Image (cartoon, helix red, strand yellow):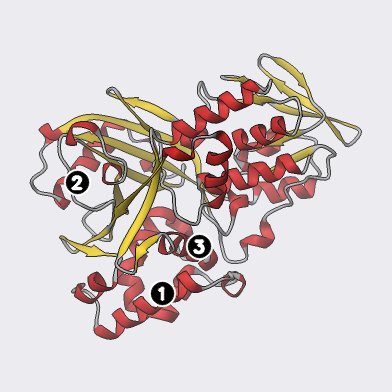
Amino acid sequence: MGLAAAHRAVTLGHTVTVIEAAPEVGGMAAHFDLQGLSIERFYHFVCKTDAPTFALLDELGISAKMRWAPTSMGYYIDGALHPWGDPISLIRFPHLTWLEKLRYGLLMFISTKRQSWNALEHVSAKDWITLWCGERVYEKLWRRLFHLKFYQFSENVSASWLWTRIRRVGRSRKSLFQEELGYIEGGSDTLVQALVAAIETRGGTIQLTNPATKVRIEMGCVKGVETPLGFLAADAVISTVPMPFISAMVPDLPNKLRIDYDAIQNIGVTCVVLRLKKSVSKYFWINVADPDLPITGIIEFSNLRPVPGGEAVIYVPYYMPVDNPLWNRNDEIFVSEAMTCLKRINPDLHAKDLLASHVGRLQYAQPVCPPGFAAMIPPVKTPINGLQIADTCFYYPEDRGISEGIRLGRAMADAL
């Protein structure tokens, strides 16, 4: 979002400086080295409805880097892995009655056709699923997924938020029976580096390992940003840091606005990335609703973006509040537990198949969006002249994603 805003602003003729706390640009879309393989810190995929992504790729001259692949989904439940995500798989799924299958299929179909989220805004995801499919379906397929992602917030998640996730993927299909997702050749770093090059070519500056410590305000107007490397004067500031940092970073905010920012809750993520000698399954993603496994699912990213040599790259995300005791476990425990889960899903997998591992942590990764969340989000444009503030919760009801980051980043630049 920050890079998209900077690129749009410098294209419009503004003098732009990007202030980045990390040693690399890209945020959640940044890459790291997994034993010689450049891969995303957190997995990303492209859907056919991601129009802002396609427009930016075209503007940067890299639209030819877009690739599409048939993907599929599995469901691991009660010790067995089942195909999922298409009408035939639903019909053959052994854990639902015929009536429950009909109701579930109808919910998914209507969700892809629904145009407006207004009617769902004050409904919880639990109540929405239960209304359409029955309480048993929620208990069997959804309760554990929500609990292991949102913990104490699990029964108070917005139906609007869930619906947009279902619709986005549901509309990225080659046919009723075949899901099709996209990726950028070379990964999200291809887009990140193209943005960096375009910003710098137009005279923009990017400062790494230099966190914004304070937005300086005088007489109701923004004057610039204080950093460890010194003060940067500015006529306008666009902030895309997570909401929990805002109160300390902008101490001169009106009290009501500070309260609104502080009220937004976030879940952290510890993301285990594994490089394996062989594949776990044929599925891109597997939902896990098994009481014996402490994960919500796995993403076999190499089933979307192929890895040289037939190896596999697996993401195992652990979402949880950062005050949960599990958050402080060391990396080795997370890797060992993730491998144990994979071996349960595929008994042919062995410890010797693990080639490399990486554990990434993000303290504020997933906004908690309760029913009525739209009314909780402050305006992007603050009462302070020249200051705009947004993070991933401002994508609502859409979830975090590159396309939404591009859309909102460019909109903030246009508002200058």
Question: Up-down: is 414 above or below 86?
Answer: above
Left or right position of 183 against 12: left
Question: Up-down: is 124 above or below 147?
Answer: below
Q: Which mark is residue 300?
A: none
| Residue kind at label 2, given as amino acid type | Leu
The residue shown at (59%, 50%) is: 393
Question: Up-down: is 148 above or below 7?
Answer: below
Looking at the rendered image, the quarter that the C terminus falls into is top right
| Residue kind at label 3, given as amino acid type | Thr
Write down the residue under mark 2.
342
Label 1 CA crowd tier, 10 Å (few <14, some 14–19, many 20+): some
- Dot 2 falls on a residue whose secondary structure is helix
- Dot 1 falls on a residue whose secondary structure is helix
The residue shown at (19%, 35%) is: 311
Q: Work out whether mark 2 precedes mark 1 in sequence or the reverse, and give the earlier one.
A: 1
Label 3 CA crowd tier, 10 Å (few <14, some 14–19, many 20+): many
Label 2 CA crowd tier, 10 Å (few <14, some 14–19, many 20+): many
Q: Quadrant of residue 117?
A: bottom right
- State how far apart marks 2 and 1 are (Cα): 31 Å
* Residue 241 shows in this picture: no
Q: Which mark is residue 164?
A: 3
| Residue kind at label 1, given as amino acid type | Phe
The residue shown at (44%, 80%) is: 131
Where residue 324 appears, as percent x and y from the top left, is: 42, 45
Write down the residue under mark 1.
109
